[in-house]
Amino acid sequence: MLNLLIIYFLLAVGIFLLPKSIKLQKGVLIAVVHLAAFIWFASKIQFISAEKPIILFAHWIPELGLNIEFLLDGLSLAFALLVSGIGASVFLYAHSYMKSYDYTDKFFFFLFLFSGAMLGLVMSSNLIQLFIFWEFTTVLSFFLISFFHEKEVARKAAFQSLVITFFGGLGLLAGILLIGSVVDSYSLNDWIAGSEKIKESSLYLPGLLLILLGVFTKSAQFPFHFWLPEAMQAPAPVSAYLHSATMVKAGVFLLARLSPALGGTAEWTFIVPLFGVITMLIGSYFAITQTDLKIILAYTTINALGILVLLIGIDTRLSIKAAVLFLFIHAFYKASLFMVAGFIEKKTGTRDLNELGGLKKSFPITFGIALLALLSMAGLPPMLGFLGKELIYEAKVQSPGFGSLIFIFGVISNIFMFAVSMRLIFKVFLGKPKNSYNVSKIKNVMFVLGPGLLVLLSLIFGISPNFLGKWIIDPAMSVIYAEPVKAELKLWHGFNLVLFLSLATVAAGALLSYILIKKDWIEEKWRKINKIIFPVRFPEVFSYALEKFVAISVSKTKVMQHGYHRYYILTIILFTAALLWLQLYFTRGWHLETSITFQPFYISGLVLIIVLATLFTVLTRSRIAAIIAMGVTGYGLSLIFLYYSAVDLAITQILAETLMVVMFMLILQRLPVFARLSAKATKIRDLIVASIFGSAMTLVAIKAINVDFNNPISEYFMANSYDKAFGKNVVNVILVDFRALDTLGEVTVLVVAALGVSVLLNSKKPKT
């Protein structure tokens, strides 16, 4: 598994190194790589179906619970087959689609990396490792959506998707850290083993909500659904891949993956289905009145994602079975439809339904592919979509909790989806042709090969679903449900309530689609009503909020980053002093045990000299006198160090003081004549600030000697200086061994400062 990912990433970089003659076929070459990966995953189906997952483990940072962990089980295998199989068809399609554009090397590089990141995500069993791949897909999707970066709408759409999904990613990371702290691990197996402990913890609900934030933003659930239609500025291959098998399915995958560890609770079975059913209804409702072909498909994707989240949230055997099956159903028809939409836009120059029509005559093969895909989306036999719709209805009918609400919304949503499918068939392919197009069959083979294979699979599995059920659906269900599960799939379920619901849905959907197709004014009225009912558009709210955030940031920057260094220093000192005084207040009650004495008299005299020299430094108007007085202060401190046998400190102090005095004396020559630049009020302010900070530091120093909350750290150094660092001089050992990096940093600072002074001294005066 790890080798496969390495191959993906190396080959992605290798795109730029291919000879020009081979580079022209890079789409086909990448498709072959995906096909090889698909065959490798397919070869593991029988092994995985025998409940023998493939595990790869390697230590990374075990002290932090971070290890490289890959897992190929029923669930990850199902997603890996989709990522690699649909990836092969998308890259074949992209080979023809992208020929007329520049910078295709970058396009294929990003899309190839994206597929590798998605494979890494679905095979990761360490949650931190999974999060890394998760964010990798976020960043790469930004580059893919903004491929036509010369268009402002593409840049805005890419930025919007990045901000929303990245925000959700931060929530996901926080949730992983919270839940991980409960079981002291980020390994998926440990989470599943500690499921009961997690659910009983007070951190379960906040952790669950944060993880769901990541899932909902990634998989475009309400109220974050609006970024998905906006992302239709991406090239058609990107839309086909991201909507069917990768980007938006990542959230669904994570929800399914964490279901054994976090699912089954009252919170799970309320929150997850609630957002899923709202998203499902929103997607189908808004798809019905759109006129842009890709945006219609985007809203149907929102509907499908809502269904998947709803089914996983219901958390019954039947709902999980329906969810895994619908995962494949949606991938087959949605990838096909997006590729068809891209082909139509490429050949006609438009995606507007009002400008299309009668394309059956010009594109008969494309019409056949689209017809089968739309029949599957509508849930009509003999397509696999019919099988999925039956199972979904059955799962909704038997759903616990607010089952009646789910049932009603589900019926309404399916009516809308049927109407959308019929509307697309008639508006795009049937009716009176508005234009005629000449199509070269040779040049367009790659355009139809990928979607053709996918709808053919949907037809085959719809007629004979047993292979899909036994070898792929069953193992995936067993992982999600955390116990062996057998799923029986068949096209005909007999005469039952679900069948009658399906017939009612078809009848109502057919009536609605007939009205919309025949009465254009109703569709127009519906759009106007929508504007009245929903006056606020989420993308506009997002843009407004972003603009306000930027405005607040600008105003805050003007206040906080004003450019006056003296105020920066004052702010830092006052804030630190306030924290110190607050800490001193909360820990009050300690008593001063150190006796104050003036013996020996020469040390007391030395302290008096230091104090007088400090006051003289502040009050004198002579720079040279001030520097000399500062030197007296520094050398006086070194004498005190000597008295208390801190010879190393004394030597360091003398060297540093000498260097500072010399540097100051040299710099003085470059400074202008001394002048009073501070008003009296400014000096009083500085005195007050200095007094507040100085008194706080004094009390902290006194308290440090009189209060011991823990054993002094000096005992550790004394005990280990000779045994571990082989040095008897404890101070030297601390500097060069225990604090080696700190000492290196200090030396580096001094060297940089010396270089800066050297440059200043050697710089030539400007000619006047």
Image (cartoon, rainbow, N blue to C red):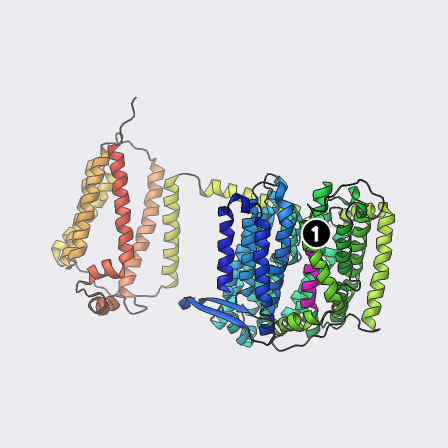
Residue that extends furthest to the bottom in the rendered view of this protein: 484
Q: Where is residue 201, by image quadrant?
A: bottom right
Residue 176, horizontal then vertical, whole percent = 52, 65
- Above or below: residue 242 compared with residue 684: below
Q: In which quarter of the image is residue 564?
A: top left
Above or below, 562 against 246 in this view is above
Secondary structure predominantly adopted by residues drawn in magenta: helix
Give the residues drawn in magenta, as a range: 322-335
- Along the line of sight, the residue nearer the viewer: 328 or 84: 84
Q: Locate the C terminus by quadrant.
A: top left
Q: In the depicted view, which residue is nearer to us: 280 or 99?
A: 99
For image coordinates 78% across by 70% down, the residue present is 491
Where is residue 274 drawn, in percent x and y? 69, 64
Question: Does residue 331 show up magenta in the picture?
Answer: yes
Which residue bears the numbered disc 1?
448
Relative vertical location of residue 418 with respect to residue 359 in this rendering, above or below:
below
User: Label 1's element?
Assistant: helix
Measuring from the top left, give residue 571's x and y in whole percent: 39, 46
Q: Is residue 228 left or right of residue 627?
A: right
Between 633 and 234, the residue placed more toward the observer is 234
**In the rendered structure, does residue 498 fall within the stretch colored magenta?**
no
> 582 left or right of 203?
left
Q: How crowded is the residue under tag 1: few (<14 C-alpha within 10 Å), some, or many (20+)? A: many
Using the image, determine if residue 183 lies above or below residue 129: below
Going 27% across and 58% down the picture, which residue do you hit? 740
Q: How many labels sit on residues?
A: 1
What is the three-letter code of the residue carrying label 1? Val
Res. 140 in view: yes
> Could you tell me residue 238's position as x and y percent?
62, 50
Q: In this view of the protein, can residue 168 be seen by the observer?
A: no
